[in-house]
Amino acid sequence: MPTLKEAPAEATIVSHQLMLRAGLVTQTTAGIYSWLPLGLRTLTKVAKIISEEQEAIGANQVLLSTVQPAKLWLASGRYNSYGEEMLRFKDRRDHELLYGPTNEEQVTDIFQRFVKSYRQLPQNLFQIQWKFRDEIRPRFGVMRGREFLMKDGYSFDIDKAGAERTYQAVFGSYLKTFRRMGLTPIPVRADSGAIGGDMSHEFQILAETGESLLYYDAVLDNSEQTKHEDLTSIYAVAEEKYDPRTCPVPEQRLRQSRGIEVGHVFYFGTKYTKSMGVSVMGPEGTPIYPEMGSYGIGVSRLVGAIIESSHDKNGIIWPESVAPFHVGLVNFQEEDISCKEIAETLYGRLCAANISVLYDDRPERPGVKLANMDLIGLPWQIWVGPQKAAQGKIELKKRSTGRVQEHTSESLMNFFQPL
Amino acid sequence: MPTLKEAPAEATIVSHQLMLRAGLVTQTTAGIYSWLPLGLRTLTKVAKIISEEQEAIGANQVLLSTVQPAKLWLASGRYNSYGEEMLRFKDRRDHELLYGPTNEEQVTDIFQRFVKSYRQLPQNLFQIQWKFRDEIRPRFGVMRGREFLMKDGYSFDIDKAGAERTYQAVFGSYLKTFRRMGLTPIPVRADSGAIGGDMSHEFQILAETGESLLYYDAVLDNSEQTKHEDLTSIYAVAEEKYDPRTCPVPEQRLRQSRGIEVGHVFYFGTKYTKSMGVSVMGPEGTPIYPEMGSYGIGVSRLVGAIIESSHDKNGIIWPESVAPFHVGLVNFQEEDISCKEIAETLYGRLCAANISVLYDDRPERPGVKLANMDLIGLPWQIWVGPQKAAQGKIELKKRSTGRVQEHTSESLMNFFQPL
């Protein structure tokens, strides 16, 4: 639990400051971070939620290499156009390689090896893998790093109608994914930029400290409840595209909030399959070019974004689904026999009930321990101190509300058991 | 399930051939592989077993960046000595970086930032992360690739006695780890090579196709049962070190088998802490240099090694703990209503019972499907065909023995349920 009292001066946004202070990550070099135990636990939970929602729509997980040969990008025409953000190098035999900034070419190449007939369509593949983009000014910690963990998915359909169905399915899975992390996602119609293509949405999550100002239909604040069938067409735009004269949403239904981009979906048709000459045998016996989409979520970025959307002046407030541990157990007097016995017994019972517990029995002052617990932001804190212990009592604090309740060990176990 | 009838000619060893034929991996470029769905499922299970056994000895998981700054290696003196296997490059701002081939420097650097006092020792950190070693002749598929997944662990102790206790604990966890994968591990005393240091063991697993010939005390064949307390000192050497005149093991207890290296442990004392100037405040108030060890398991290599140790002429025979799915469900007549109903009901019931099932309902001939199932090597096959289905029967084949038993759906569920 390597916490810091002060954030290093280079951390200018709250998530970066809190991630360094709470010991979630540590910088290796500019824009490159290593994940410490608490941070890795959250990163793993975020990745797991993403995988589960991709599997729920029938996508298959793969894991592509981080290093790619330049020739794949020469085939698509992007090797020269991608720019300096691509980290290029040569191996000892002078072959041109690169650290993948994205994987459209590589997945299309794999698709081509194994998929020969329209009967094998649709295909929807995803991976969660490290990428590298050599940003000229890496900043904001893991929010705009150079080496970052990304979930990228790629779909291949027989025709445009199929590709649009897949786009809708991924779109829906993204809304679920972000909601499971306690976030409010706003899908904003976007340009397709370097990826190219016909249709694209950014997923922004609401956070007061967000980088963009969004204008959107209030339906999206509560889109889980809405009966609207096609959420891709609901009004949501970034500030630079907002024009009150043309905005179709009535004023009383228009919302304005700041957001952070955490995902991006693209439908780009046959751009890569045509440029790379990837076809399958169609039902008529003639080759057809599959219609593709690609879909990304910034996995490591999300850890920062969740903190931006959920913190207070004392530290992080983790949503339960992504907290590194469910409970922090604080023994105020680690040398007091009664405190030690109560704390250790509770620790054993909570672990046995499959509730993840971080047990702080360091010889530190109670104030330091409580400040650390607030900083690292576990959803629940259990306090064991000598005064209450003498009455057979312990205290339970809910991090998000700050409310403290008295419990016996029994009532505490009953409180957590149904989880 | 992108299986191949023939392995590409460059695959000269059986695990490489079977991994390509069974569609576990596909080559991106020389020595660099991408993992397809079945392969990734096994890779993930292998990694999970390794993590669990590291956590069981109190090691904490971290995740260090794949890209490192050259300056860390200049500090330890290894930047120039490591040789051409290190993949070096410059970023757009002309900073010297490298793709980590191992992480002693990086972990020592992180240790130094957070650990200031002997009271914070011991520390035992591990990660499972991609590494790159630019082998001049990458070969044998994932067994000797350039980009590979490795579990690497690093320990810091206050003194030599502590470091030796940690070495023993990791040593024991490695034996358990490999046994959980159905393997027989042989710890062979080794040179410490490029890592440097005082004590080192290689973990070899037995496989007829192994690269090294080992001579070892028969006690190790069954070390789980042995009461021997210190397994680090039991006789086991590679052929080049075997000398019948000095071998301390009586002939009737001496075994000779081929092995594949899958792990390596090193105790190297203060080599890196001294060269990098990393000390902590000792109990006497004077700085001390922590004693280090490092511990590696080739995670992606293990997938190949398990196949080398467990296959037959028809394909892979996965040990249950690392099989991509527990059961393969083959419907011979996907258009037969009765077959379809039996197969789909069973599929639902097995999934509900948390038994992972790969359901093959492709419109292929039964012979093709059975050959594919043998090739991919799931522990159990359930066959649903029209003749048996008419009698309310199905067949269950155990891949490792080839034995086929008749079942009703009920008796089959009873067979699997207690899992």
Image (cartoon, coloured by chain):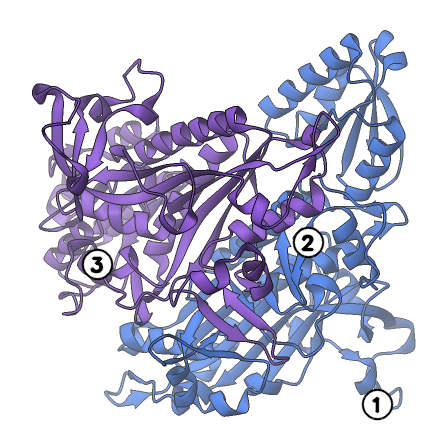
Chain colours: A purple, B blue
Q: Which residue is mark 2?
A: B26
Q: Which residue is mark 1?
A: B246
Q: Which residue is mark 3?
A: A16
Disc 2 and disc 1 on one polypeptide chain: yes
Mark 3 to mark 1: distance in Å? 61 Å
Q: Is residue B255 left or right of residue A115?
A: right
> Which amino acid is tagged 3?
His
State which quarter of the image contains the C terminus of chain A: top left
Mark positioned earlier in the residue sequence (2 or 1): 2
Q: Is residue B230 left or right of residue A261?
A: right
- Chain of residue at mark 2: B
Whether residue A392 appears in this view of the structure is no
- Camera-near label (3 vs 1) is 3
**Residue under the point 27% across and 24% down:** A234
**How many residues crowd around disc 1 within 10 Å: few (fewer than 14), some, or many (20 or more)?**
few
Query: A163 or B218: nearer the eye?
Result: A163
Q: Position of residue A123 (x, y in %)?
A: 59, 35
Whether residue A40 appears in this view of the structure is yes
**Residue under the point 43% across and 80% down:** B105
**Residue under the point 15% across and 55% down:** A14
Q: Position of residue B127 (x, y in %)?
A: 47, 63
Compared to residue B158, the image places residue B65 above or below, namely above
**How many residues crowd around disc 2 within 10 Å: few (fewer than 14), some, or many (20 or more)?**
many
Mark 2 to mark 3: distance in Å? 38 Å
Query: A356 or A221: nearer the eye?
Result: A221
